[in-house]
């Protein structure tokens, strides 16, 4: 089945560091990818929708200069948390829309990245 | 905008018993999809079951089934013969149909505890 690889799975770094998270679709081309943020025992909140070759669409309240999203190829989207601070600590999950022509199929999720800013 | 509501923050069930998780949603669209996802402590998102709005028949996947009431905008999940491995956080989710692949809107989640 379709697989999405998210890397790294865990990051611990100092305040002020920029952190890049990668989301790769391993066996299909993903025109659209999604980035979510999740706090403990809370729901997934969509941060942005990433479309290959174009600018990401950010949800209301998400700082686009803080959370940089790049979707340069059909198999890779990256989320960079710039100048991270402790309040950015969270669980980040990506998902990829299935290949073209499979609109009725569900998204494929990565395993998530636990980000801890000291 | 669409909204999804899960009114049960926590539920518990005895092993081998049946439990039903509630979900309601609000939409003006006629073409959409509904999902139940399971998130165990590992925090992987696991698709449990899905339903296309145009299908009247309720979806079933082994011990998991849904009660889809389109007019009432209700989409509950029934877990039969509950197992310890069913313990997790469960999310109901909505996705629009249409020509482009839409985003998922999640409910607040329900934490399910299974007692041996």
Image (cartoon, rainbow, N blue to C red):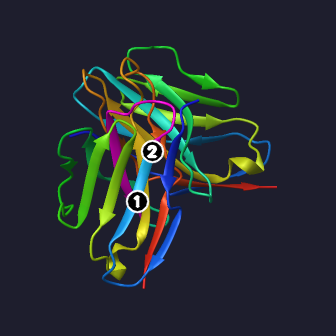
Image position of A100 (left or right of A41): left
Q: Horizontal and vertical percent for residue A71? A: 29, 45
- Residue A33 shown in magenta: yes
Do callouts 1 and 2 point to residues on the same chain? Answer: yes
Q: Main secondary structure of the magenta part?
A: strand
- Judged from the image, the secondary structure of the residue bearing numbered disc 2 is strand
User: Where are the magenta residues, as a range?
Assistant: A24-38
The residue positioned 42% from the left and 29% from the top of the image is: A98
Q: Is residue B114 above or below residue B32?
A: below
Where's the C terminus of chain A, which quadrant?
bottom left
The residue positioned 50% from the left and 61% from the top of the image is: A8
- Which sits in the foreground, A67 or B52? A67
- Judged from the image, the secondary structure of the residue bearing numbered disc 1 is strand
Residue to which mark 2 is pinned: A24
* Dot 1: chain letter: A
Mark 1 to mark 2 CA distance (whole Å):
10 Å
């Amino acid at each position: 089945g379709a697989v999405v690889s998210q890397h790294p799975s865990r990051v611990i770094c100092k305040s002020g560091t920029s952190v890049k998270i990668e989301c790769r679709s391993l066996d299909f081309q993903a025109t659209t990818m999604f980035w979510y943020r999740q706090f403990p025992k809370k729901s997934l909140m969509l941060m942005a929708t990433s479309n290959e070759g174009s600018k990401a669409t950010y949800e209301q309240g998400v700082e686009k200069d803080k959370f940089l999203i790049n979707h340069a190829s059909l198999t890779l989207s990256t989320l960079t948390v710039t100048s991270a601070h402790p309040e950015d600590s969270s669980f980040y999950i990506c998902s990829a829309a299935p290949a073209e022509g499979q609109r009725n199929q569900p998204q494929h999720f990565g395993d998530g990245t636990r980000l801890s800013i000291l | 905008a669409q909204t999804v509501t899960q009114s049960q923050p926590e539920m518990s069930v005895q092993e081998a018993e049946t439990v039903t998780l509630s979900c309601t949603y609000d939409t003006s669209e006629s073409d959409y999809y509904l999902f139940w996802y399971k998130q165990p402590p590992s925090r992987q998102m696991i698709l449990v079951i899905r339903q296309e709005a145009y299908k009247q028949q309720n979806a079933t996947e082994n011990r998991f089934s849904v009660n889809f009431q389109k007019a009432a905008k209700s989409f509950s999940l029934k877990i039969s013969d509950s197992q310890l491995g069913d313990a997790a956080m469960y999310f109901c989710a909505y996705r629009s149909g249409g020509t482009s692949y839409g985003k998922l809107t999640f409910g607040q989640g329900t934490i399910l505890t299974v007692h041996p």
